[in-house]
Amino acid sequence: MKSLKGRTIILGLVLIMAVSLLPSSVVAYSSNSSLLSITHADYGDLDDDGADDDVITEARIGSLTGFPEFIICTVTFTLTLPSGANYTTDVVICGIYDVVDLTIEWYDHATESGWYKIHAEMESVTMLWEFSADAYVIFDPPEEGPPGTPWVRVLVNNQVPFW
């Protein structure tokens, strides 16, 4: 009987330790934070077609601890035109990092005059944490551009090692 009681206590301690190591949800909600920020949004002629109808967005994604760690991160960027039309692109980053800088180029999207909104929503998972954040910026390209076929290019501005 004595050894069964000792094994039960040890098993209980192991279960408590295992449960305490499971990922717990930590939510950060901010329009600009160390987890996710849109650092620049503007328009211009990125594709050299003679029209200032392209939108450039620069964003910074950070780790929860501020130190390099293995993170699987999904960021959804949505560009909303003054008419309410939405364009969305998803970026998935999987690797070891503390900060990643992205450039998102929205070609032939600035076709209306008025206020544009870029909204980014991030969900990240590490070995110990799950966290999310969002950010947005509103800006105003000055005039309408010619219609074109909208497309998006995403550039990772720093190297993210996978392992």
Image: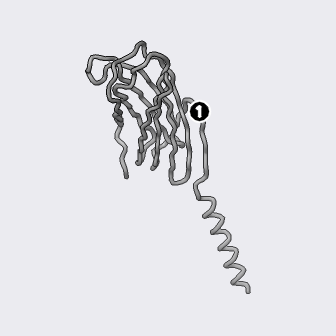
Say which residue label 1 marks.
30
Left or right, residue 2 beside residue 48:
right
- In this figure, what is the number of numbered marks? 1
**Relative image position of residue 45 (x, y in whole percent):** 31, 19
- Residue 72 lies, with reference to residue 107, above or below; the image says below
Query: In this picture, is 20 found above or below 46?
Result: below
Q: Quadrant of the N terminus?
A: bottom right
Q: Does residue 73 sit above or below 31 in this rendering?
A: below
| Front in this rendered view, residue 33 or 142 | 142
In the rendered structure, the answer to whether residue 44 lies left or right of residue 73 reads left
Question: 140 or 4: which is nearer to us?
Answer: 140
Q: Residue at x 55, y 38 (%)?
A: 133
Residue 106 versus residue 16 in the image, above or below:
above
The residue sitting at the bottom extreme is 1
- Seen as rendered, the residue at the extreme top is 142
Residue occupying the point 44% across, 23% down: 41
